Structures are given as structure tokens and as C-alpha cells.
Amino acid sequence: MNSADVLWVLVSSVLVFIMTPGLAFFYGGLAKRKNMVNTIMSSVVLMGIAALLWFAVGFSLSFSGSGSIIGDANWFFLNFPLSDSTLAPNTMAFAFFQMMFAILTPALITGAIVERMKFSSLVIFVTLWSLLVYYPMAHMVWGGGFLFDIGSVDFAGGNVVHISSGVSALVLAMVLGKRNHYGKATYHPHNVPFVLLGAALLWFGWFGFNGGSALAMNELAIHAMMTTNLAAACSMLSWLLIDKLKNGKPTLVGASTGAVIGLVAITPGAGFVPIWASVIIGLLASPISYFFITVVKAKFGYDDALDVFGCHGVGGIWGGIATGLFTLKSINPAAAWDGLLFGDANLFLRQLGAIGVTICVAVVGTLIAVGIASALTKGIRVSKKEEDMGLDHCEHGEIAYPAFDGMD
Amino acid sequence: MKKIEAYIRPEKLEDVKEALNKQKVTGMSVTQTMGFGTQKGWKEIVRGTEVDYNFLHKIKLEIVAEDDRISAIADSIVESAYTGEFGDGKIFVYDVQDAIRIRTKERGSAAI
């Protein structure tokens, strides 16, 4: 056991941990005031469910065994000695690090369905989704499954985390339907500083997400830290530029959104692409997502409330493609080929294949999970009256803020 | 000229606003307010302990219009704010002596 490597992975784990409450503030700030508690709870509850599930079956199904789609039951209940170092730098440290990813990923989905989904249905859905989509994806890409075997690469979770959650969010939002007053009432963010607070915690945690994915205290970790920060910075700036050109004024919600999209886009390539490429990946990430959020969403009329598909799905797909374009195997020998830009189409085509597989798994898994959740809770949507009153009062009996006049 | 003062459920504001738009109401004021009527208060559990809230959140709408439009406007509020349960609210109608538009100094019905 290399102490320095273990230290870095443990520090990275707690960085990734803070992303989930950070995400809760990011989503909460974007939602309506009357749904603040519910929006935050949707992420926070996973800090319980997903952790327990990871201990019981998740880690084993993701990282034990050599199946092509899913792992085996060998490591159920983390049943291996603490000295085990099958997985670098130490199997238990790795399980702890990956536990944080398993918490965050289903939480990402919840942004699409805010303000109208029953909490009980959501709890069942995210549990099933972890089993049907997340563990198989983690195994296929990182645990020695077939996406690993064909040689596609995903440094920190472009496919596993972002495309899978983004696409699932779109499917779930379509099954759930639009909010009552969608297209009529204004659904503007109720607390812009909270949006930035959340985005800042996500950015901060992302250094562990990407930097820690090197799984060692080495040059690759340093490299991933630098690409991560540059992509976020550039994507934030390009969103602000779009704001300025389209509406004349740069916005804080725009800056926060742009930064998160940049972080998503660099995730699969953070430890594969040259540092200069992270600037290009970041600069292009915002315009691509902006197009989906403002043009495509409006055209098709789906109510992806907080743009999970637009940010994580689309940003993740761009990141996966960009990894196929810019990867240099001299940076990370885990890649078998250079990217398309350096004259080799091998990796690029495998990246496209991996993206396609991820989309299929996410769509099928989500439909099954939502079908079961709907059957168990007799529909996944709150009544119109409950939606109008707000989910904080109706689902939790707890409101986020006192009245401005302080009379309550 | 008369003023309508309507107390409604907060969750009905969007529906009422839509109904009033159909009536082509030219302006209204909306206030967050608290109070109680027949419905009385509600309870919240804070760390396991029950806490009483004596006042309920309501929305107050104020609309000034010509006499002949008042009953249509009031009807549309009643229809859109109705649930049939305690706490649907009340509507009061008052006479208005005069109105002045500050920008143009117009008076009376020209100002509303």
C-alpha cells in the first residue's frame, strides 16, 4: 500500500462527497421557493440510500468479477480484507472513493423532475436505477466489462456518470410530463446566490472527481487538475459571451451553468487530452449545451426542468467525442490509440460506440425503473393541488423559509 | 369605480391570474399576507416536536375597475380560486372616490 496514493484517494473522496450537497444547493436555487426543501431532499436522501446500497451490493456488482455487463456477488457487504489491494491504491479506499460517485450520479437525475414528482416514487426509482443502470455502466466502463475491453476510455465518468444520468433524466421527465403551468408561468430561479454556491461546491469537488480518478499521487493527477480547471473557466466565459451577445447582459446563473457544463465536458478526457485541448473543450461546451437548452428543448417541448439533459447529457456526449478527438496515449497509456485529430480513427469510433451503448442502457433501465416505481406508488406524480401548493408543504410538511414579514 | 380586494390561496394565484388575463384586467396589486378565518392554522413537525402555526399564508389581490366590470371580475376570481374546502378566501368590494395616474396627472376612470 502506497500511503501517498491512499491519502490522495481519501482526500479526493471527501471532495466528491461535498458535490452532492453542492448539487442540492445548485438545483434548489434554480427551483421555486415552495419546492426548495423537496429539491434539496431529492439529492440528500441519496447520501443515505446510495451509500447503503453501495455497501450491500453496489461495489461488488460494479467492480468484482469479470462479466462483460455486470460484476458478481463476491464483494457483497464489502466482504474482503482491509489489506486487499486488488484495486489501486487499496480496494477499500477505492470502494470509498467510488461510493461518492454512486451517490452523486442518481442525484444528478433529480434536477429534471423537480416540482412535480412524488418523493416516495423518487426513492424507489433511484434505488432501482442504481441497480439497473449505474452498476452495469460502472462495470462495463471501469470494472472490466466490454466497453473497457473494446478500448473506449472514460477517465472520470463522462459515460458512467454524466451521459447516463442526463439521458435518464430526459426519459424520466418525459414520462412524468410537464409541470402544470409550464409555458405559461415563469419558472425563474428563486435564489441566484444559492445557484452559485452550489456550482462553486461542484467545481471544488470536481478536483477530487477528476484529479482523484488518477488513483495515485502522480503527474496524471496534476494533469487532470489543470485540465479540469481550464475547461470550467473557458466554458464559464463562453456562456457569458453568449449571454452578452444574445441578451446584452452577462448573468450569474449563466456563469454557474457554463462552469458546470465545462466540468462535465472535461470529465471523460481530463486525464487523456493535452492541457491546451481542455481550453477548446471548455470553450465549445457552452454553445453546444446552450443550443440544446434554448432551441431543441423549446422545439420538442419536454420539461427537463433544470436542464439535466442539456448540461450533463449533452455536455457528457461532447466530452466523450472530444476525448476521441484529442486523446494522446503519451499522456496516459491507458488509451490504446491517439485521437482522431492525430490521425487515428480507432479510439474515436469506440468512443461513439460507448456513447451509443450508454444511451441505450440509460433509456431501457430508466423505463423499467419508472414502470416499477409507478406500479408500487400508484403513479409517480403528485396531484395538481399538491403541485400548486408546493412539494415542501405537501411531501415534507416543512418549508424552507419564513415569511418575509416574519409573522410566522 | 370600485376596488376589489380578494384574499385567495397562494397556490391558486397562477389560476386566478390566468382568469383575470382573460377578463382583460389592466392592472392589479398582489401582496403576500397572513391571517386566519374559518380554516384556522396548521402544524409542522420540527425535530419531532409539533409546532403550531396560527396564521396561514394568503395572497391579497387588489383591482380597481369600472362599476359595470366588477361583477364579471369577481365571478372569475370566485371560479378560479374555488376548491370547496375551508380556506378558499373572501372577496370584498369597496367604492373608490378617485384615481390619479401620476405620470400624466389623468383623473378618474382615465387613470385606471
Image (spheres, rainbow, N blue to C red):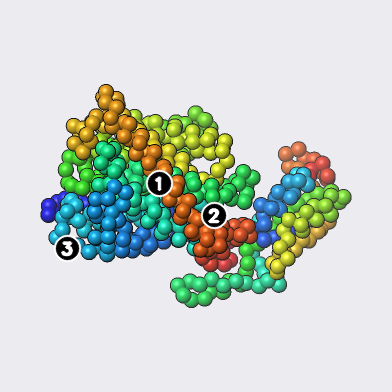
Disc 1: CA contacts within 10 A as few (<14), some (14-19) or many (>=20): some
Of tags 2 and 3, the one toward the viewer is 3
Q: Confirm whether residue A164 shows in the render.
A: yes
Residue B34 placed where, x, y %?
64, 64
Residue A393 placed where, x, y %?
55, 64
* Residue under pointer 1: A361
* Residue under pointer 3: A81
In this view, the residue in front, A43 or B97, is: A43
The Cα–Cα distance between marks 2 and 3, rounded to whole angstroms, is 44 Å
Q: Is residue A374 above or below residue A178?
A: below
Residue drawn at 52 percent across, 59 percent down: A374
Mark 2 or mark 3, earlier in chain = 3
The Cα–Cα distance between marks 2 and 1, rounded to whole angstroms, is 26 Å
For the residues tagged 1 and 3, is the chain the same? yes
- The C terminus of chain A, quarter of image: bottom right
Residue B61 placed where, x, y %?
71, 55
Q: Chain of mark 3?
A: A
What amino acid does circle 2 point to?
Answer: Glu
Mark 2 or mark 1, earlier in chain = 2
SS of the residue at dot 1?
helix
Of tags 2 and 1, the one toward the viewer is 1
For the residues tagged 2 and 3, is the chain the same? yes
For the residues tagged 2 and 1, is the chain the same? yes
The Cα–Cα distance between marks 1 and 3, rounded to whole angstroms, is 33 Å
Disc 3: CA contacts within 10 A as few (<14), some (14-19) or many (>=20): few
SS of the residue at dot 2?
loop
* Residue under pointer 2: A115
Mark 1 or mark 3, earlier in chain = 3
What amino acid does circle 1 point to?
Answer: Val
Q: Looking at this rendering, what residue extends furthest in the bottom direction?
A: B49
